[in-house]
Image (cartoon, rainbow, N blue to C red):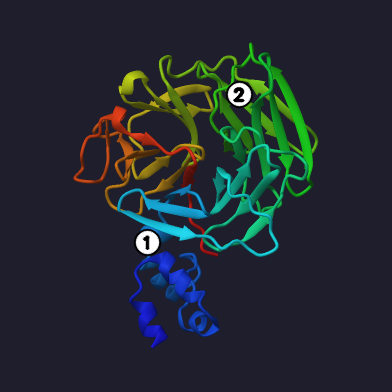
Amino acid sequence: MVEVIAKYIDDVLDYLHFRATNKIFRLSAPPIQSRSSSSSSSSMLSRFDDLSMCPLFVFLEKDKVFTFVHPKHGLEYKNIINFPEGQHWNLDSEICYSKDGWLLLVAVNKSFQVFFNPFTKEVLPLPFGNKQIINIRCFGMSHSPTSSKCVTVELNKKSADFTRAYVHLLREDDLYLIRYKDKDFSLYNISPAFHNGLFYFLSITGKLGVIEVTREQISWKILEKLQAPCSSHFNNFLVECDGNLLSVFERDFAKGVQVFKLNEDTMTWMEVKSLKNHMLFVGKTSFSAVANIPGMENKIYFNRFYGKSVVFYSLETKNYHTFKNDEVVNFHHTKELLNGTWIQPRWH
């Protein structure tokens, strides 16, 4: 009977909760695994393509409630998290960043910061020792927090004249500090992008800076000869996509979005007219994904909502839209959700 019920559950989060009921349920309902594991697990995964593979927008509400929203179908799902006993959880936490299914939750100025996977309920408490994260808008990670290669970078403007970059090698628990003058590079408050072993970050004027982390030394530089690709904008993001570094610029007065690719041979920006079968997700955490659902490709998804629908920009129509009735959205009527981010689900 349990096997029959499991076959008719078509929501991936409900399915995972069903399996978590007890040992009998776990034995009767096979786990969701990656596509490459086996033919049986692939057929199981295909039932949940929409939610098991597609990035979701997650935001944190009061009373430990995480809400997940599918960018195309909506499918809003509220999940009340019963955090593990014995852990000190702060209900005023904000979502700082996501990486490979993990969320970094931070309560600024309250000495609380923890990695948490809302899909598996795993916890990595206090990964930064005594270093408190202050700027949750400008934080980047190289790998999953479970990886021995994981490096984090926090950029923080500490005074009117200087910005500091805190570089943390997570497994070694080594913390490094870089300080530079704002007149050389005025920081734009977005998350850096990790690309080809380097952290890239943008200035307010669109100039590109680089932090290189090796076991021998930590260094940073400004790519002086690289011209800013866009002179007029109110928002910008960096994203790695298909092996390339992309910059995304939202133009002033909601006049559209431009995407540029860094040509690393000539060190010049080239405008991108189409993302082909890729899609970009931008906000506190920015990344790309291959569209596995028809109609989602060649679009940029923001942490903004029009009503209850996710807002995206189509490079084909050159307009802001939602998937509800394929309507064109008045950008000035959208709402940005600050305590949320895009996340790539990981079920194991």
The front one of 209 and 114 is 114
Q: In the rendered image of this protein, does residue 167 appear above or below residue 80? A: above
Residue 298 visible (yes or no): no
From the top left corner, tell me how far across and down residue 103 is, in percent. 57, 50
Picture quarter with the C terminus:
bottom right
Residue 221 appears in the rendering: yes
Task: Check residue 208 in the rendering and tell me which mark sits there, or answer none.
Answer: none
Q: Residue at x 77, y 45 (%)?
A: 129
Q: Which residue is mark 1?
A: 49
Q: Horizontal placement of 202 versus 253: left or right?
A: right
Is residue 74 toward the left or the right of residue 86 in the image? left
Q: Which amino acid lies under the numbered mark 2 shown in the image of this protein?
A: Gly
Q: Position of residue 101 (x, y in %)?
A: 53, 54
Which residue ends up furthest to the bottom in the rendered image?
Answer: 1
Q: Residue at x 57, y 37 (%)?
A: 195
Check residue 209 in the rendering and tell me which mark sits there, or answer none.
2
Residue at 40%, 54% (x, y): give it.
Answer: 54
